[in-house]
Image: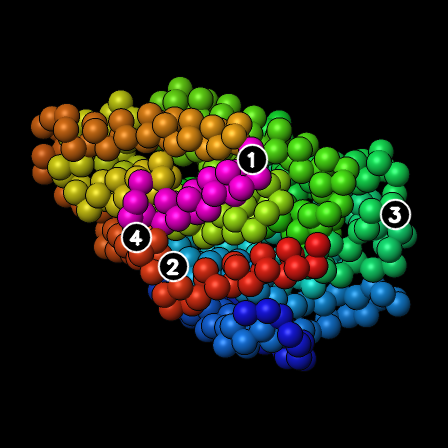
């Protein structure tokens, strides 16, 4: 499915804009919760429908383009629905529908305050995320990337206690500083090449900058995206942001923020620097060292976390670097595995956070040691958690197995046996910090949850749906949307141009 032509279409613009247009209606309905939630669900459904409308063209190798604003010659704000952007947009917009349903159950069940601000910020966040997915160049990417930072800040500080305010300030400090580095890097690239357009195989060429200059530029851009991507030592804001409501944690970890970060890592590696420049200046080695360190250390830290959400947060930090490591391998299998892990981790991790939220709201338990026997009272919730745990560990038939398979193949093809060892050790560590939760829930007895039952259907149905999707997309990775074909088409474009 090679990219063969571009065509002008306003669909990418409307896919970005629809949830922004819903914000006034959400605010206007502040005193009518049912109506406010109707606007949220309607905007989510329309956004997903608009993204789906772009899918037939993308499968035929046709790329929809829309120019928002031409600033100067060679500098414009533009949207492009290429294969990689479509891949990410489908995941984010599809999971927003399920997250919206889940949010209704969580916010009502937890009797949260400021729900109107919550749903409005959520809508802006998804507009920014789709804008990131469809950004045609680095400048457009940076603008939507910063908008996502500002839109998610009210979600991080939602409870407005001292801990939340402190976490929000840390998040802003990290993310806005990273954004400034990206702005400086973009100016440097434009001054060197005269363009900022994302190009399969890269904008930069060998010899355009000195070795030192290329490495400095690489650090600037990778720090820019690496903050949201959770690459150590830029990760500390992420576990601290777990003070936010659980649907926000799901948004941060599965749908929008951190996925935008690692989406950016792949964009920089494959569409700004390109495999040839990455290899010529050993940039892939630098990325692999940081990614490998993050995978192992974050997994070990996760073992020590008693709080379930923090354990899942460190798990996210580790798994995001699987995607960066896939890009660092610089071969088709590695890039494919990394891209697929964006989608597989999304469905698995959102399942686990949905389960954690159901436990917190319904059983009022947050620590792993307090979960004895809860699986017998909440069997659907813990069955879904088991599926997510299996997938992150790499056990078939959950889709995490598929992405890990390609990552391991990429390691073998590149002759990177140490990288292969990192993936295998990480799988064992995943089992060590996730399966004790399953064991406590199902195989330890306790009478204190005997009459509890499941949480609200608004919460249980979405978590079961994402668990089922995690299995279905392993067995049939092209089902419905052709996600596997979109990933391989994006990789083909990168590798052919290199």
Q: Residues within 10 Å of mark 2 (few under 14, many from 20)?
A: some
Q: Earlier in the sequence, mark 4 or mark 1?
A: 1
- Residue at coordinates 36% horizontally, 23% vertically from top-left? 306
- Residue 208 is labelled as 3
Q: CA distance from mark 2 to mark 1?
A: 27 Å
Q: Circles 4 and 3: CB distance less than 8 Å?
A: no
Q: Position of residue 336 (x, y in %)?
A: 52, 51
- Residue 415 is labelled as 1
- Residue 168 is labelled as none
Judge left or right: residue 100 versus residue 362: right
- Residue at coordinates 83% horizontally, 60% vertically from top-left? 195
Residue 34 position (above or below residue 361)? below
Judge left or right: residue 100 versus residue 363: right
* Viewer can see residue 498: yes
- Front of the two marks 4 and 2: 2
Image quadrant containing the C terminus: bottom right
Question: Which residue is label 2 attached to?
Answer: 477
**Quarter where residue 220 is shown:** top right
Q: Residues within 10 Å of mark 4 (few under 14, many from 20)?
A: many
Q: Earlier in the sequence, mark 1 or mark 3?
A: 3
Q: Which residues are magenta?
A: 395-416
Q: Is residue 189 magenta?
A: no
Q: CA distance from mark 4 to mark 1?
A: 30 Å
Q: CA distance from mark 4 to mark 3?
A: 46 Å
- Front of the two marks 4 and 3: 3
- Front of the two marks 2 and 1: 1
Q: Earlier in the sequence, mark 4 or mark 3?
A: 3
Question: Which residue is label 4 attached to?
Answer: 471
Judge left or right: residue 42 versus residue 279: left
Q: CA distance from mark 4 to mark 2?
A: 10 Å
Q: For the residue labelled by badge 1, is the local secondary structure a helix, a strand or a loop?
A: loop
Q: Position of residue 317 (x, y in %)?
A: 50, 34
């Amino acid at each position: 499915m090679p990219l063969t032509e571009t065509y002008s279409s306003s669909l990418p613009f409307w896919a970005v804009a629809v949830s922004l247009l819903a914000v006034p209606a959400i605010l206007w309905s502040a005193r009518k919760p049912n109506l406010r939630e109707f606007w949220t669900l309607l905007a989510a459904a329309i956004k997903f429908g608009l993204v789906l409308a772009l899918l037939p063209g993308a499968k035929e190798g046709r790329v929809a383009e829309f120019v928002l604003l031409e600033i100067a010659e060679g500098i414009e704000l533009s949207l492009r629905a290429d294969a990689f952007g479509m891949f990410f947009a489908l995941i984010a917009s599809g999971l927003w529908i399920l997250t919206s349903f889940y949010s209704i159950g969580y916010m009502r069940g937890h009797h949260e305050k400021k729900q109107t601000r919550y749903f409005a910020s959520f809508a802006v966040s998804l507009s920014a995320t789709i804008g990131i997915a469809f950004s045609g160049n680095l400048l457009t990417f940076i603008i939507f990337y910063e908008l996502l930072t500002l839109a998610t800040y009210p979600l991080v500080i939602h409870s407005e206690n001292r801990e939340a305010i402190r976490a929000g300030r840390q998040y802003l400090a990290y993310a806005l500083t990273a954004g400034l580095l990206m702005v400086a890097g973009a100016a440097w690239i434009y001054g060197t090449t005269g363009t900022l357009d994302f190009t399969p195989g890269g904008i930069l060429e060998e010899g355009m900058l000195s070795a030192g200059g290329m490495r400095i530029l690489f650090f600037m851009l990778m720090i820019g995206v690496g903050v949201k991507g959770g690459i150590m030592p830029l990760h500390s804001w992420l576990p601290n942001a777990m003070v936010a409501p659980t649907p926000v944690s799901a948004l941060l970890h599965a749908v929008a923020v951190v996925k935008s970060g690692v989406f950016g890592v792949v964009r920089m590696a494959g569409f700004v620097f390109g495999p040839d420049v990455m290899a010529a200046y050993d940039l892939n080695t630098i990325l692999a060292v940081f990614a490998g360190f993050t995978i192992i250390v974050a997994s070990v830290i996760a073992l020590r976390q008693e709080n379930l959400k923090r354990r899942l947060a460190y798990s996210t930090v580790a798994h995001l670097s699987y995607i960066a490591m896939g890009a660092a391998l610089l071969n088709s299998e590695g890039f494919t595995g990394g891209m697929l892990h964006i989608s597989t981790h999304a469905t698995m991790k959102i399942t686990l956070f949905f389960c954690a939220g159901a436990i917190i709201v319904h059983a009022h338990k947050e620590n792993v040691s307090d979960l004895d026997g809860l699986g017998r009272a909440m069997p659907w919730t813990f069955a879904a958690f088991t599926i997510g745990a299996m997938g992150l560990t790499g056990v078939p038939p959950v889709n995490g197995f598929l992405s890990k398979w390609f990552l391991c193949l990429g390691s073998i093809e590149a002759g990177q046996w140490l990288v292969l060892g990192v993936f295998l050790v990480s799988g064992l560590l995943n089992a060590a910090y996730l399966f004790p939760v399953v064991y406590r829930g199902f195989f330890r007895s306790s009478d204190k949850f005997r009459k509890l039952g499941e949480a609200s259907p608004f919460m249980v149905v979405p978590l079961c749906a994402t668990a089922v999707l995690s299995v279905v997309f392993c067995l049939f990775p092209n089902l419905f949307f052709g996600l596997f074909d979109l990933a391989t088409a994006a990789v083909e474009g990168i590798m052919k141009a290199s």
